[in-house]
Image (cartoon, grey):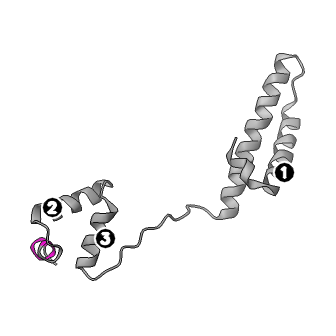
Amino acid sequence: MSLRQLARRTGLSKTTVASIESNEAKGSVRLESLVRLADAMDCDLVYAIVPRHSLEETLNRQTTLAAERIVRRVSDSMELEAQGTPSEEQDRLVEEVANRLRENPRDAWDV
């Protein structure tokens, strides 16, 4: 379908349709505009957020990251008091904290 034909079907000017297409390419198009173009082409607009990784992988990554932050915060405080934790122990604590966070994953996103 040409730009002219699409403009006629939408009731918009060719300039407006071209602007919508340009904005879509830049990632700044309004969904309302895309819906209007889709309707004119007898199509449905499908808008979706698709995960990059599995839910399990995302959860494991986030709980580990949160656990590392928690353990590092505590470890930094202990080092200031000359009570530092060896790195092997920190690794064990990270895994332990991450496992606890997996039991209640909501908490992993607050850290």
Comparing 94 with 32, the one in front is 32
At label 3, the amino acid type is Val
Q: Is residue 90 left or right of residue 58?
A: right
Q: Residue at horizontal 34%, vertical 63%?
A: 31
Asked if the residue at tag 3 contacts the one at tag 1, i.e. Cβ–Cβ closer than 8 Å, the answer is no
Is residue 24 magenta-colored? no
Mark nearer the viewer, 1 or 3 = 3
| Residue, far bottom | 42
Q: State the image coordinates of residue 103 (x, y, percent, origin top left).
A: 82, 56
- Tag 2 residue: 16
Q: Residues within 10 Å of mark 2 (few under 14, many from 20)?
A: some
Q: Residues within 10 Å of mark 3 (few under 14, many from 20)?
A: some
Q: Residue at horizontal 83%, vertical 45%?
A: 97
Circle 2 — which element? Answer: helix
Q: State the image coordinates of residue 7 (x, y, percent, origin top left).
A: 13, 71
| Residue 100, label in figure | 1
- Tag 3 residue: 35
Comparing 24 with 79, the one in front is 24
| Residue, far top | 81
Circle 3 — which element? Answer: helix
Range drawn in magenta: 3-7
Q: Residues within 10 Å of mark 1 (few under 14, many from 20)?
A: some
Comparing 89 with 49, the one in front is 49
Residue 39 figure quarter: bottom left
At label 1, the amino acid type is Arg
Mark nearer the viewer, 2 or 1 = 2
Q: State the image coordinates of residue 111 (x, y, percent, origin top left).
A: 70, 41
